[in-house]
Amino acid sequence: MKALVYHGPGKSAWETVPDPDVQDAGDAVVRVDTTTICGTDLHILKGDVPEVRPGTVLGHEAVGEVVETAPGVTSVRPGDRVLISCISGCGRCRFCREGAYGQCRGGGGWVLGHHINGTQAEYVRVPNADVSLHPLPAAVPGADAVLLSDIFPTAYEVGVLNGRVRPGDTVVIVGAGPIGLAAVAAARLYSPGRIIVTDLAPARLDAAKRLGADVIVSAAEDPARLVDDLTDGLGADVVMEAVGVPDTFELCTRMVRPGGHVANIGVHGKPATLHLEDLWIKNLTITTGLVDTFSTPMLLDMLAAGRLPASSLVTHSFPLHEMERAYEVFAHPAETDALKVVLTSENLPQ
């Protein structure tokens, strides 16, 4: 089969690799119909995730059809159309029993495109298939459903729930990439008083406005001052970091009110300074997190009911064999206005 293979920082190629097959009792093999590229994949290519070994197939988001299952799999069977979760859970360890599948100690967690071959391929082996695969209704388009592999559960769980967004809150989202935009949509479910979004890219700020942001501000225009003005000097109740660089994390800590919440969503490859000399007295809650995807079934129900604006995040579509071109487009949003790019198998309509 063909797959996008990581060959070290800055190096990847769409090339021929061996077909996957079942290895463990809980495995399934899925033919990939729809996949996408995540900001985390770009972090891997930059060398920010050193655990990813050269030779690994990238990707952790997909929709496809089950073609083979191991004897221990009971919830899906060949022919089923499924969503592949970015997180795999054994279902048995302490963390899985608490719904914290991202911290699985039984061979799960974030493994696809990280510790084992991922979904940017024609076929993928999915471990712990009973927990990791979600049957999809035929009426849900793959290009919409694939956004529930990662970005919507991440925005909802790591951003909105960890940040404890409540009705009437002032919510600031730093970064209007796909995760930040999904956080806008997810935060609106809790009726905040206002949502403020900051980013450097005008096209992404416009997208945030379309998705329901009340105020948008360029990161070059001192967003901290704007938040100060809008809150009479108090600061935001909740600030979400959705970029993953030191400057944006430190900006978040400057914009939050005493007793507020900073929810870090971004993937960080470098240390950020925690200014405890200023923050110790403010009673802040700072959370980090890898998504657990316990919310995926609920979000799928909302998607099927038309309550999630998934399709509005997709700006570019490619056939699967144009993976390298899709990466170029996704990696240069300032030139391409790319938000989420979707790739589909050649046997599906483009």
Image: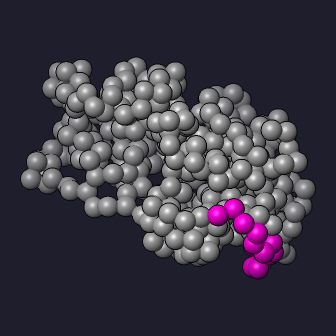
Residue 170 part of the magenta-drawn span: no
Q: Residue at x 62, y 58 (%)?
A: 60
* Residue found farthest to the right: 79
- Side (left or right) of 247 relative to 22: left
Which quadrant of the figure has residue 137? Answer: top right
Vertical placement of 238 versus 108: above or below? above
Query: Camera-side residue: 331 or 262?
Result: 331
- Quarter of the figure that contains the C terminus: top right
Vertical placement of 272 versus 126: above or below? above
Dominant secondary structure of the magenta stretch?
loop
Q: Residue at x 54, y 57 (%)?
A: 41
Vertical placement of 290 versus 227: above or below? below
Residue 213 percent location from the top left of the image? 43, 24
* Residue found farthest to the left: 277
- Side (left or right) of 274 relative to 333: left
Report the span colored magenta: 13-29
State how many labels appear. 0
Query: Camera-side residue: 122 or 83?
Result: 122
Colouring of the image: one colour
Viewer can see residue 116: yes
Viewer can see residue 109: no
Which quadrant of the figure has residue 49? Answer: bottom left
Query: Camera-side residue: 231 or 40?
Result: 40
Residue 267 percent location from the top left of the image? 42, 55
Residue 27 part of the magenta-drawn span: yes
Query: Camera-side residue: 320 or 25?
Result: 320
- Side (left or right) of 173 relative to 58: left
Residue 220 percent location from the top left of the image? 28, 31
Q: Residue at x 18, y 46 (%)?
A: 283
Residue 99 percent location from the top left of the image? 55, 59
Q: Residue at x 85, y 39 (%)?
A: 349
- Quarter of the figure that contains the N terminus: bottom right
